[in-house]
Amino acid sequence: MSTVQFSVVDVFSTTPYKGNPLAVVDDLSSSLTDTQMKHIARQFNLSETTFVSLPTVKNAVYRLRSFLPDGKEVFGAGHNSLGAIWWLAKKGSLGSIKPSGADNRIHFNQQLGPDALPVVVYQDPGDDNQGLSVTLRQAPPKFHGIHPNLAELAGVLGISEASIGFKWEGKTIATPQVVSTSTTRHLLVPISDETVLHNINLVDRDKLAKEIQYADNMAYGLYLFTPSSQNASAADGLPIFHARFFSPGMSGEDPATGSAAGPMAAYLYKYGIFELGAMASQEEQKVVVLQGLRAGRACYLTIAVGLLEGKSVQGIDDREAVSTSVTGQGVEVMKGSLVIPGTEMKF
C-alpha cells in the first residue's frame, strides 16, 4: 500500500498539547486527489488538515489546501496556513529561500486558493526551538452584515443584552459584524468582560447557525472577544484580548482562529480602538489574542493592522482600507506515515 508522510503541529503555542492541533500532509508529489484529501481530513478529524503541494500560480513557492472533517475546503489564512509554513521551515524546506533585509527574515509567497499571499518567517538565532515564528499577511479586510437584533443574539449566547459590547478608553464597542480577509466569513461579537465570555456555553448549534446567518448568510463562524481585565499586557507590552470561536460545523470549540483574529484587528481599527498616526510607530498597531482556555488550550496570536501598501496616513480616511496580519509559533507533537485511500473510494 502507498503511504504519505504527515505531522501534527500544535499551532500558536510552543508547548505540546496547548496549541491548536493541525494535521499537515506532504503532497509535494501532487499525487493526491480531492477525494483522497477529504478522506484523510475526515480520518484526522481535527478542525483542519492542510496539504502542502506545488503551486499552480506564479510567484508562489508552495500551495496549501485545507479541508474540514466534513470535506469542505476552506481558504482562511489562519492556523491552517501558519502551521503548515511553520512545519516547512522547521524541517528545512525553506533553505533555498535567502533571508532579506536587516532583520534577516525570509520573505516569500504561499498559494491559498487562487491567491499568492505574503509570508514572513523569522528564526531567532539564539533560540533553536522556540524562536521560529511565522507572519501571514492576509488579504485586505471586507466588512459585511451587522447582526440586526442584539437581544435575540444575546439569548442564544445565554447572556444579557447588556453583556454584548465593551468599553475601551471611553469608547463603547457593541456592534456584532461579519468581517473577512478571505472567502471565510465569521460574525465578530464584542463581549463585556472575561467572566461573561468564559461562562458562555453554546449547546444549540442550529440556533447558533441561524443567528450567524441573520447577519450574513455566507458566514459560518462566531468569534467572541473582550479586552483582558485591568488592561493586562503581554511580555512585550502589547494589550491582551481573550477570544472564543464556535462554528455549527465543528464538533467542539476551536482553540485558535487566525481567520477571525486577523479580521478582528481590522474591526478594532474601524471602531476606534486602534489609531494609525503619522509616526512610524503608529503605522501598525498590534494586540495579543489569548484563545482556547475553555478548550484546555492556551494559544497566543499576535495580530496587527496597518496601512495598505502604497497608502499614506493622510490618505486613510476609510477605516476599512487597511491590511491585517497574524503571527504565531508552533510545536510538532506527532509525525508518521498514513495509508493513501484508494482511488475507488467515494466521499
Image (cartoon, rainbow, N blue to C red):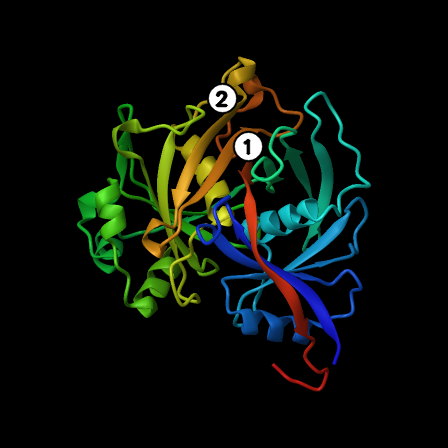
Of mark 1 and mark 2, the one earlier in the sequence is 2
Displayed quadrant of residue 119: top right
Q: Which residue is mark 1?
A: 322
Q: Quadrant of the N terminus?
A: bottom right
Q: Which mark is residue 276?
A: 2
Three-letter code for the amino acid on which mark 1 is drawn: Val
Q: Which type of secondary structure does the marked residue at label 2 adopt?
A: loop
Q: Which mark is residue 100?
A: none
Q: Nearer the viewer, residue 141 or 102?
A: 102
Instruction: Say whether residue 116 is visible.
Output: no
* Image-based side of 315 in relation to 94, left or right: left
Picture layout, residue 283 above or below residue 124:
above
Picture layout, residue 306 above or below residue 143:
above
Q: Residues within 10 Å of mark 2 (few under 14, many from 20)?
A: many
User: Who's the residue at 50% across and 41% down the image?
Assistant: 262
* Image-based side of 36 in relation to 15, left or right: right
User: Who's the residue at 42% across and 39% down the image?
Assistant: 289
Question: Pointer 1 and pointer 2: residues touching (CB < 8 Å)?
Answer: yes
In the rendered image, residue 148, in percent from the top left (x then y), is placed at: 31, 51
Instruction: Say whether residue 164 is visible.
Output: yes
